Amino acid sequence: MSAPSLMPSPDLVHLRAAGTALVLDLSADTLPRVLHWGADLGNLSDAHLRALRLASRRQSIGFSVDQPVEVSVLPEQSAGWLGTPGLVGHRGGADFSSAFRVTGTELTAGEGTPEGRPGTVVVHARDAVAALALTLTIELTPEGLVRQRATVGNLADTPFAVDAVNLTLPVPPAAVELLDFTGHHLRERSPQRTAFTQGLRVRENRTGRTGFDSAYVLAAGSQGFGNCGGEVWAVHTAWSGNHRTFAERTFHSVALLGSGELLLSGEMLLGPGDSYTTPWQYGAYGRGLDEVSARFHRHLRARPHHPSSPRPVVVNTWEAVYFDQDLDRLKQLADTAAAVGAERFVLDDGWFGARRDDRRALGDWYVSDEIWPKGLGPLTDHVTALRLEFGLWVEPEMINEDSDLARAHPDWIMAPGARLPGAARNQQVLDLARPEAYAYILGRLDALLTEYPIAYLKWDHNRDLVEAGRRTTGRAGVHDQTLAVYRLLDELRSRHPGVEIESCSSGGGRVDLGILERTDRVWVSDCIDALERQQIQRWTNVLVPLELMGTHVGSPVSHTTGRSHPLDFRAGTALFGHFGIEWDITSAAPEELERLKQWIALYKELRPLLHSGTAVHADHADPAYQVHGVVAEDLSEAVYALVATGTSELYPTGAMRLPGLDAEAVYRVRPQAPGDIPDGNAHNWGMHLPWWTEEGVELPGAVLAEAGLQAPALHPERLVLLRVTRV
């Protein structure tokens, strides 16, 4: 992928990368305005850029101000904008409206810049009357993502209260439809679509974590945009605490997407010389959702700390044993795991203090003498002797009132004052912004990682932050808590660089680019029901690449829904992610273990492709069927899944299109074992598809993408795999 090129004129900046363009108007001394964000415009001269600015200028409509309303990336009422303001704050009730004037601009371009992020504009501004400083950083990454954040500084000798800082990106009139997400525990990231009508659509998250029902990614697009078609503009806030995401369209033809941290009342009071920096806001443009996702995925994969080793097959003990931790039983589970090809063994909740259930001992991060009289050594020795990595579950941000830690330090619990918030899951929140609490947790985790050969931490977070106050100040503390968690993760990674960390938050409650800067995968959901996972994983993948998504094979009967699914459907669903097992496989029949072993072997064969290729999703006309897959970056091979999520009105269903291939190349398409048995009635009655053979069929990529192949009829809640190789 080529690096972005930066072509500045005195007051215009044109950034280009990977088929996208961002044109910024820096004229006069007002904050930057976006003249274009979207498809690449080609190599424009200074004259062309000036003409674009002229052609983009709106008519003056009067009433608010007697000149055209200029909407910057930090919109200001002083410019005539009467929509959502960029900066909301005051100094004792005064200085409620900002009027920043630019004092300097820095432009950086080309490869080899100090931070490796070519295509950066840094704008410095001041409001002399309000005594405020502002720094805006706007980037176009090599993958074509727009990234921006703001820092607001207090220049006066009196406090300034910051209530909100909202950064925005404009979208054109063609964006008439919105997609965002809702959900709950066990059904995270459920898509919802609405018309992008006039007015303000706001999604607020106040849970203190990313949240099950956060907007996640807010996309605006042309009518009927899908996975492969239509123009799409999307934003994401890289922040693991409270946040606000919105889409706004006004009567004078301004439409924009915006976001920022949601600050609680009084949470951000800047003293003299203090400053506040927003989270990064990311913007992605693409032709179809898959192109938007590919930009996020390539950006994450380009990070120097992105996991580079093959993602090991995980066995997690939770749904196998729950709190019933017994050395012999766990040894047997580890033996069986090693026999089927697992590579990492994770001991879940229940190993510490008096933790025999979920009502006590959170905070007492000492190995239980009752369950483990000789420490964890006998188990870790056995696991590592099997050539399995050892992992451990922790929940460092939480505390039970029934714990030695709470009895010793009740003032370490987050609360709005003398009274405690209502308990949730029998637990409260530990104030990690308090230095003593932070030092205690850091010390205990550091000691465990030093004493035992722990290669992996499953880092859980099992309640929302309700009334999360700082007892030392009496102020809301979600912002400070989020930064403290980031510092804790950063420090542990610095001390133990080989340890991987998973973000688990009641399953998928903390999935965002902020937490992913410090972790190596996310636990997608506590629901391992393969049917539910088809949707949850698909929409998690709109932001997160497959190698960072924890996807496990659950029990034959789901522990969260009670549904029964055959092994091939469960394993074929888990294949598209970071594969693992959460099932008491010591109780599995020999033929099940043999079949599981085959799926694990396939995962190991395919993971170089799955974890580096481009995720694709067909816009399949039949709502009962889904087609998704991964295409190699060089377009040489691909793997697809055809998934029947229900029964179809069509029998058989129509052709399935295979997107993402080289239109000019010829490919061989064939069923991929062990996902090669289309167990619908037609197949069972001996009525087989003519091309469904080991030899398969050879067709050009254009034919596969446009005409497709006749799909086999499947029973509901079943899937098959297709392997595609360039001839």
Image (tube, helix red, strand yellow):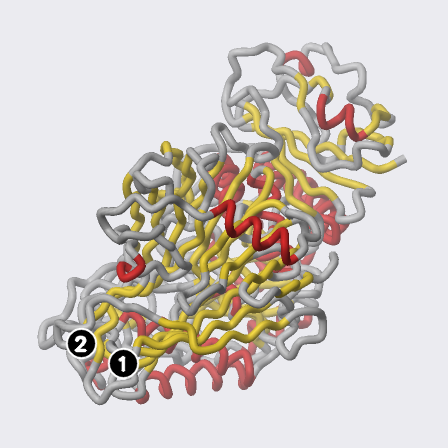
Q: Please report whichever mark, 2 or 1, sits nearer to the chain's N-terminal start.
A: 2
Q: Secondary structure at mark 2?
A: loop
Q: Which mark is residue 315?
A: none
Examine the rendering and report whether any part of residue 212 can be seen: yes
Q: Is residue 5 above or below residue 692?
A: below
Quarter that holds the C terminus = top right
Give the crowd class for mark 2: few <14, some 14-19, many >=20 residues within 10 Å.
some
Foreground pick, 692 / 252: 252
Location of residue 311 in the rendering, given as x and y in whole percent from the top left corner: 66, 59
Q: CA distance from mark 2 to mark 1?
A: 10 Å
Q: Residue at x 28, y 75 (%)?
A: 430
Residue to which mark 1 is pinned: 131
| Quarter of the rendering containing residue 561 | top left
Look at the numbered discs 2 and 1 and tell me whether their residues touch, using CB distance below 8 Å.
yes
Location of residue 495 in the rendering, given as x and y in whole percent from the top left corner: 55, 85
Location of residue 357 in the rendering, given as x and y in whole percent from the top left corner: 31, 63
Residue to which mark 2 is pinned: 91
Q: Amino acid at mark 2?
A: Arg
Location of residue 529 in the rendering, given as x and y in whole percent from the top left corner: 47, 40
Q: Residue at x 18, y 80 (%)?
A: 471
